[in-house]
Structure formats: C-alpha cells, structure tokens
Image (cartoon, rainbow, N blue to C red):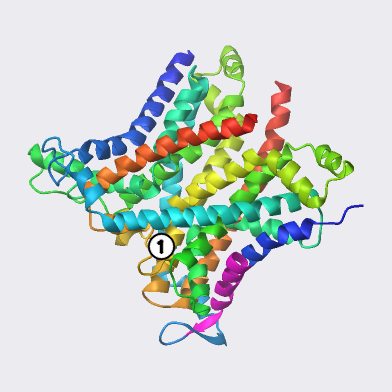
Amino acid sequence: MAGDKRRLSFAAFCATIAFFYAPLLVLVLFSFNQSKTMTWGGFSLRWYGDLFFHSRDLWRALENSAVIALASASVSTLLGTLAAVGMYWYNFRLKKYVQISSFLPLIIPEIIIGVSLLIMFGLARMPLGLPTIFIAHTTFCLPYAMLIVSSRLDEFDFSIVEAAYDLGAGELQALLRVVVPVSMPGIIAAFLVSITLSLEDFVITFFVAGPGSSTLPLHIYSMIRFGVSPVINALSVMLMAASVALAFSTRGLVKYVGKG
Amino acid sequence: MRRNLGPIYTTPMALWITAFFVAPVCIIAVYSFCAKATYGGVVWRFSLDAYAALANKGLAAVALKTLLQSAAATVITLALAVPASYYIARSRYKNALLFLVIVPFWTNFLIRIYAWVAILGTNGFINGFLVSAGLLSSPVQFLYNQYAVVTVLVYTYLPFAILPLYATIEKFDFSLIEAAQDLGATKYQSMVRVLLPNIKSGIITAVLFTFIPAFGQYAVPQLVGGRDSFMLGNVIARELTVSRNLPLSSSISVALTLVTMAGVLLFVKFQAGAAQKVRPAREAV
C-alpha cells in the first residue's frame, strides 16, 4: 500500500541526490585530468601544481577574503551581541525602528544592498577597495549575528543576572562574567555564520570592490568568465575538502562549548 | 532600580545599520524620483520619468521573464522537494539522509554554478562526451539560455525547500494516511487531501525560500543566462554600471524591493491563516 507511494518518493529522493552530487563529482574527476579539456586524457596532478605554485592572484584573493571575513565577523559579532543584549532586556524609544531596520537586510535582495551601497560610496566619494568591502560585509552579517545571539538569550534565565547584581556585581561585571559566558555558544555560532556569509558572498562584494581588492568569489567569477579551466576544478576540490573539514571541526567546537 | 542601558547596548548596531543600510536605501528611493543627468548621475529635479520607464516594453518583458523563471524554478523545486522530504521523513536513516542533502551546499556558491558551466558549456563534459562518442559533429551550446538559468536556480534553492518541508512532514502523523486509506481513500486521494493540507505551512515556507530569492537573483542569470533570460537584478546592474542611468536603476530597485516585501508580508499572512485552518482539523481527528 504505502510501499508504492514510497517508490515514487524514493525515486524523487534519488533524483535529488544525483542532481546534487553529479556536477560536483564531475569537477572532482576532471580535476585529476591530464588534458586541458573536459574529455578524459589520463590521470595527472598538474592542475593542483598550477593551483599551488602558479596562481599568485588567487592566493592574494584568498588572503583578502580571509582578512575581510575575520574583520567583518568580529565587528558584526561584537555589535550584534551588544544589540541582542540591549534589545532583549530593555525597552526604549525607537526599539521598533531598530528591530525593523535590522530585519529588513535579511529579506531584501542582495543586489539592492550592493547597488545602494555603491551609489552611496559614490556620493561620498569613497574609493572602492577592501574598506568598502569590509563595511558591506559587516552590514549584511550584523542582522544574522544579532538574531543568533538573541535566540541563545531566549534560553537564558534572567534570574542569574539579577543574582549577580544582588551579590554586588556592577553592570560591566555582570555583562562580562555572567551574560557573555552563558551566551558563548550563541556568540561563537554568530561569529562562524558571519565568517561563512562573508567568505561566500559574491553579489554584494561584486558591486563594492575596487581594482586590486578581489576576494576569492570575485576571483573565481573572473576565472569562470573565461570558460572551463582545469585549475578551477582543482580549486573546487580543495574548497570542498576545506569546507567539509571546517564544518566538521566547528561542529565539534560548538558542541564542546555548548556543554561547558 | 537599574539604569536603562538598552540604548547604550543597541546604539552601535543601530548607527551602523542606519548609515550603511537605511541611508543607502533612502538615497536610491530619492534618486528614483530625480531626473537623469546627461553623463550619468542625477539632476536634483523631481521627475517621474524613471517610473514611467518601468512600463516600457523592454522592461515589462524582463519583469515577466523574471516572474516566469522564478515561478518555473519554484514549481520544479517543489515537485522534487515534497516527495524527497517525504521519503527522508519516513526513512529510518533520517539524519544521515538529511546530511546527504546538506553537504553539497557547503561548497562555495560560485563553484556550484561553475560546476554547471563545466558540464553544459561548449567545451564542457556533456559536449566532450557526445563529440568523442561521435554523436555530435560539433559542440552544442547548452548554456546561456532560460533552461540553464532555471536548472541552476533549482540547484541553488532545492535544499532551502527540502529543509522546511522535512521539518513539517516529520511532525505529520502518518497514521492519518492509513486511516484515510482504511476509510476507502485511494493513495492519490490520501496524499492530496490528507497529507498536503497538513503540510501546508511547510509548502508555503518552501515557496518563500525559493521564489523570493530567485526573483531577486543576479549571479545565476549573469553566469549561465543569455539575452533571453536576464532578470530584473541584471537590468539594475546594467543601468547602473553600463548605461549610467541612476534614476532608472533606482526605480527598478525600489520596485523589486516593494515586490519582495509584499511577498514576505503575504507569506506571513498565509502562514497565520494556514496555522489557524489546520489546527482544528488535526484536533478533530
């Protein structure tokens, strides 16, 4: 009875998995291809050699990406955490404005954020480069950082903060020695999500980047525009391996901190 | 009584968001009502030209194309996602299967698009295979058309549809399907009239997660689309960086933003409605 229906859903599931993995498997396979084209010409590691020893621009772009990701994730996590604490325990005028204005960037198309920032930087005569990319990345990471820390505060028992006050803790002490340690899993998650968003972003960065400030996604974009390149195949495999490794290790980290 | 420190904690973020999100969006809203200067830029004079231009034939066609491509991507995504998430939810290995769905999306977004360029391009995998097998005499361009755009949109958003659908189907009481069939419903009837109404909120969320971002897409049509498949996002960028028509670029941005926000509001309304309608039905059973 239900078996027939499940056959259909099993087929859809298999089709989905094949659809997801086939393109990536093709990339993995052809990254070991001797020939420059997408027809098999024997096993070779030459594209990995090219990637590691003859792609200076790409490594420069990766360095830019790393610097931007760390900087914007740090600032957005810091501001987002403070705002989450402020919004969670206090009421004040303009709270509604803060709520709405920090929620909108999550639903507005990326291109609008990129284009509007580009127009504003133009008006302010700000030269485009790493600082403008940093500003843009911090802007789109902030709402996520704030929401993630807020959701951690949801599980927070406010009475322990009151206990800290009763025992004579000052505002700063209560914040640093009670609130921050308890919300640490949320803060770490906010930081990691911000890093990921920053490393991944292409559209917004595309508009606010200037000459010489290429990030990794921008560099990949310029490579793709010249069509298929075996070096991108090799790069893809390295990136896949890196993100899988990163995802596994940070999972362990979040779990570990969550327990403590 | 303690001091109200809320504003102190919140001000840094509020200032940042105001300076780098609210202000830029207000600037484009103002620009959209200005006249176009001859060499790019705007003239500070009130004008509705940029909004009148929205109705011109070329732009209306792009808007329609944007709607059709994102609607097609949404329908195909749901057609795959509903049965696939049903299968995951009823499987004994839920977590492993869900993991299998998520892993490919740890790869960089551009790499995932590039994979399709490497497969469908004239010097890509399929052409290489067909030509060397003697089935084609010269490569065929499978890229840079609307089919490529819809395929890659489905590829991009499918997991975002599967996750909320899985979450809803997982909570569904499958004995209801058996009950319906015991009472004489066919398999098809039990799916359409028992399962689907009960997972409506998951379906609505899946539509939101697919249609809204697809509608505002820029990167996918830019990389695998062609003249026939450019979307509103691409026109915004073209008017800004190539034609230097800032008012028009701004008015399209304003329109796109309003449509997106209307979509999200509609979603919130539907979702509230769906929650209200389904709950009594569940309790009745």
Please state which of residues A118 and B62 is positioned toward the viewer in this rendering.
A118
The residues colored magenta run B19-36
Left or right for A175, reference A165: left
Please state which of residues B239 and B66 is positioned toward the viewer in this rendering.
B239
Residue B24 drawn in magenta: yes
Mark 1: few/some/many CA within 10 Å (<14, 14-19, 20+): many
Residue at left offset 73%, top offset 23%: B284
Number of marks present in the image shown: 1
Q: Quadrant of residue B202?
A: top right
Q: Is residue A254 visible?
A: yes
Secondary structure at numbered mark 1: helix
Q: Is residue B87 visible?
A: no
* Residue B156, placed above or below residue A10: below
* Residue A173, placed above or below residue B46: above
Give x and y (percent) for residue B172. Answer: 61, 24
Residue at left offset 53%, top offset 64%: A135
* Residue B241, placed above or below residue A6: below
Which quadrant does the C terminus of chain A fall into?
top right
Residue position for label 1? A206
